[in-house]
Amino acid sequence: MSESGAVTDSGAVVGADGLLRCPWGLSTPDYVRYHDEEWGRPVRSAAGLYERLTLEAFQSGLSWLTILRKRPAFRAAFAGFDPERVAAFGPEDTARLLTDAGIVRNRLKIEAAVTNARAVVAMGEDFTATVSDSPSPTARARRG
């Protein structure tokens, strides 16, 4: 294996553990974990997809690293990203979230997260079929 820090022809970088990663995936331990365990892997559950949608919206204008570090607090604040539970949030929940220093406290983003949860619930299984970027495990390639 190449020496730690060596860049391959493809642009991947050899980590201290000998594994190849995208250059950004080596900048912090948080990114190493995210790169190795989540990035580029399919998400198929409604809760998982809703979590990604919500966190991406909260990330707007901020670094992804900020959101990754706040993710445990987001999960607690948004009921584990259970769309059914978040869809039931009301004005008192918005007020509660606006005082939660563990998350990004932006009223419009919080309200959008609740509105999106309601849309996810309204779409039902169509949400995962529409949003998931990966084929189902039983999908067949089209021929012709």
Image (tube, grey):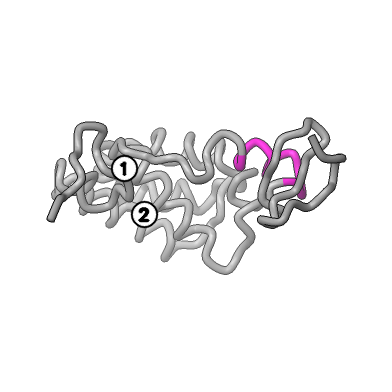
Contact? badges 2 and 1 (CB < 8 Å): yes
Where does label 2 land, which residue?
A: 113
Which amino acid lies under the numbered mark 1 shown in the image of this protein? Val
Which amino acid lies under the numbered mark 2 shown in the image of this protein? Ala
Residue 64 is situated, as x and y percent measured from the top left of the image, at: 60, 55
- Between 134 and 27, which is closer to the camera in this rendering? 134
Would you say residue 84 sits in the magenta stretch? Answer: no
Residue 126 is situated, as x and y percent measured from the top left of the image, at: 15, 47
Question: In which quadrant of the rendered image does the C terminus lie?
Answer: bottom left
Q: Which mark is residue 136?
A: none
User: Distance of mark 2 from mark 1, alpha carbons?
Assistant: 8 Å
Side of 88 where 57 appears, left or right: right
Would you say residue 34 sits in the magenta stretch? Answer: yes
Question: In which quadrant of the rendered image does the N terminus lie?
Answer: top right
Residue for point 36% across, 54% down: 113
Residue for point 48% across, 37% down: 75
Residue for point 24% across, 44% down: 128
- Between 26 and 10, which is closer to the camera in this rendering? 10
The number of numbered discs placed on residues in the rendered structure image is 2
Instruction: Determine whether the residue tagged by mark 1 lies in a helix, strand or loop.
Output: helix
Q: Find the residue positioned furthest to the front.
A: 144
- Between 57 and 90, which is closer to the camera in this rendering? 57
- Between 69 and 107, which is closer to the camera in this rendering? 69
Highlighted range, magenta: 26-35
Residue 132 is situated, as x and y percent measured from the top left of the image, at: 30, 47
| Prevailing secondary structure of the magenta residues | helix
Where does label 1 land, which residue?
A: 86
Q: Residues within 10 Å of mark 2 (few under 14, many from 20)?
A: many
Instruction: Determine whether the residue tagged by mark 2 lies in a helix, strand or loop.
Output: helix
